[in-house]
């Protein structure tokens, strides 16, 4: 039986652009993983690794125009958005190159023997080493930053792990182009091209997670798809870490004082955040808790006015568009739900933005649990709460999210009232807490955390920022090991000049 073709499709028209590849067979997945496994040792030299990542960033920028043209043809995200995303991707590669060169990520700790301690301490030396071959499941909504050369790939390569990427079917042509750039960068530094593998096809993704030589996996996508892979990773004879980013509601709380003070501003900001990228951001605010009194009316009116001026947009593929239209209709049919501005189909290939409203009391029981699930696309749910007790009851029922946002008045921000207690109720819900802002826009910075309680993610790690490298490492301790047998990272004379903690003292 011939392998199924992989087509590049224009989401603006639904028409096929070109055949890019064929879906990988089980044998081809096996060969790709085995080649990556055999290439592990080539990434051992940190200097070469850092240079490879920098060259990869340069390579992406050298063919920027071609990459953006293909990415736009396959995603309809537009050149402006994609130019920024490509710049972010190149920045991520260079940032991880800097982390590799510095070496602090190895977390070197040395404790010399102390026979007088109770109990006695032997000679102990610890560092982190790469796990092995990492699988990366590319995301649909970030064809650069969470795809073939995205943060998962960059952090895994920085850790010293070869990567096999399962390409997303929404941008296969771009995936092939970017993989070629990475492989050219590898070859430029004497590394085997197999340090970056690429496979296409649903079945290939399943075969990949089951491969016995796979050591870890990173995923960004739906709850359904991510949970199936997570369960498969756990069901293996040897389970492996699965770092999945699944679904996120990203709740927003607007206090009564904030609504009264700047309701128009909050409504306008919400409109911009929920419609950004046609609502296809993982941190889109999906539930907004607004006071039911007249102060909240100002937020809703400003939201209506701003979203009414938003043009219809093209979603990433027809399947997502159909799921959005059906999901909105199902939510709108629930008792007590109203639609001041109806979202849904905007045309044969487009969707229109809008929002739903519901009394917060409906969210305190199980009958409206659908409103507490992410609906991918340009829609949000505005829940009107009567008092603090009602607000607290709703927050207690929310699932884990990537972000939680609160809008405060100037007095509350200065420490007056119960703002501290409100923040404390939001912290258990999310990995990033936003005050007087909007969650869309994830800065790539050392202090960033892009993760959260399930179903936002399946682990406690971040997929954005420098500490994302920790997902692909494990610690190893050497006890009473003769000096000639120690790796250079753990020797007393510190020949590599690494930051380390020696006998409890941090050395740089």
Image (cartoon, rainbow, N blue to C red):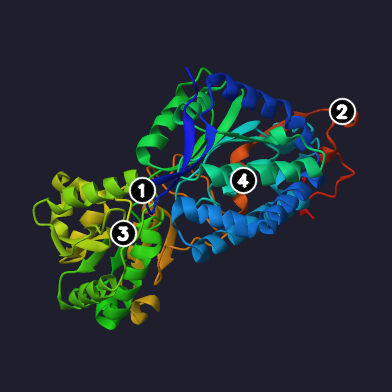
How far, Cα to Cα, is label 3 from label 4? Answer: 30 Å
Crowding at mark 4 (Cα within 10 Å: few <14, some 14-19, many 20+):
some
How far, Cα to Cα, is label 1 from label 4? Answer: 36 Å
Sequence-first disc among 3 and 1? 3
Q: Relative to residue 259, is residue 472 depicted above or below?
A: above
Quarter that holds the C terminus: bottom right
How far, Cα to Cα, is label 2 from label 3? Answer: 59 Å
Disc 2 vs disc 4: Cβ atoms closer than 8 Å? no
Sequence-first disc among 3 and 4? 4
Under circle 2, the secondary element is helix
Disc 1 vs disc 4: Cβ atoms closer than 8 Å? no
Sequence-first disc among 2 and 1? 1
The percent coordinates of residue 30 (x first, y second) are 60, 21
How far, Cα to Cα, is label 3 from label 1? Answer: 21 Å
- Taking the image as shown, residue 480 lies to the left or right of residue 293, namely right
Q: Mark number for residue 282? A: none
The percent coordinates of residue 116 (x first, y second) are 78, 35
Q: Mark number for residue 378? A: 3
Sequence-first disc among 1 and 4? 4
């Amino acid at each position: 039986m011939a392998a199924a073709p992989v087509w590049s499709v224009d989401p603006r028209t639904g028409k096929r652009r070109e055949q890019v590849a064929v879906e990988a067979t089980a044998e081809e997945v096996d060969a790709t993983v085995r080649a990556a496994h055999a290439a592990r040792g080539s990434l051992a030299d940190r200097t070469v690794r850092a240079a490879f990542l920098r060259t990869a960033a340069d390579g992406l920028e050298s063919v920027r125009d071609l990459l953006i043209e293909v990415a736009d043809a396959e995603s309809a995200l537009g050149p402006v958005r994609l130019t920024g995303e490509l710049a972010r991707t190149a920045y991520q590669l260079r940032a991880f190159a800097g982390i590799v060169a510095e070496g602090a990520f190895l977390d070197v700790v040395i404790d010399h023997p102390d026979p007088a301690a109770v109990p006695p301490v032997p000679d102990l030396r610890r560092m982190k080493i790469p796990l092995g071959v990492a699988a990366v499941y590319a995301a649909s909504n970030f064809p650069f930053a969470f795809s073939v050369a995205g943060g998962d790939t960059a952090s895994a390569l920085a850790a010293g792990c070869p990567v096999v990427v399962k390409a997303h079917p929404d941008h296969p042509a771009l995936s092939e182009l970017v993989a070629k750039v990475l492989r050219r960068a590898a070859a430029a530094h004497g590394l085997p091209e197999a340090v970056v593998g690429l496979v296409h096809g649903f079945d290939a993704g399943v075969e990949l997670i089951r491969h016995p030589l796979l050591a870890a996996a990173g995923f960004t996508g739906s709850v359904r798809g991510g949970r199936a892979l997570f369960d498969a990773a756990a069901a293996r004879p040897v389970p492996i870490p699965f770092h999945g980013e699944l679904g996120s509601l990203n709740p927003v709380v607007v206090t009564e004082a904030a609504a009264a003070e700047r309701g128009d501003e909050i409504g306008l900001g919400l409109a911009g955040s929920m419609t950004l990228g046609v609502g296809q951001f993982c941190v889109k605010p999906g539930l907004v808790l607004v006071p039911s009194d007249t102060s909240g009316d100002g937020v809703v009116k400003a939201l209506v006015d701003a979203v009414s001026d938003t043009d219809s947009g093209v979603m990433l593929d027809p399947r997502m568009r159909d799921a959005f239209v059906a999901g909105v209709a199902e939510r709108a049919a629930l008792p007590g739900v109203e639609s001041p501005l109806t979202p849904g189909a905007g045309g044969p290939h487009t969707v229109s933005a809008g929002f739903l409203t519901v009394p917060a009391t409906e969210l305190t029981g199980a009958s409206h649990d659908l409103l507490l699930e992410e609906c991918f696309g340009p829609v949000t749910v505005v829940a009107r709460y009567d008092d603090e007790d009602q607000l607290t009851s709703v927050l207690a029922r929310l699932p884990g999210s990537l972000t939680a946002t609160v809008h405060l008045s100037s007095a509350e921000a200065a420490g007056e009232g119960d703002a501290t207690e409100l923040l404390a109720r939001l912290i258990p819900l999310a990995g990033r807490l936003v005050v007087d802002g909007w969650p869309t826009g994830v800065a790539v910075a050392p202090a960033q955390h892009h993760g959260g309680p399930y179903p936002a993610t399946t682990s406690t790690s971040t997929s954005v920022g420098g500490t994302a490298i920790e997902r692909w490492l494990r610690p190893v301790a050497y006890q009473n090991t003769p000096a000639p047998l120690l790796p250079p990272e753990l020797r007393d004379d510190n020949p590599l000049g690494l930051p380390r903690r020696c006998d409890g003292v941090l050395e740089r």
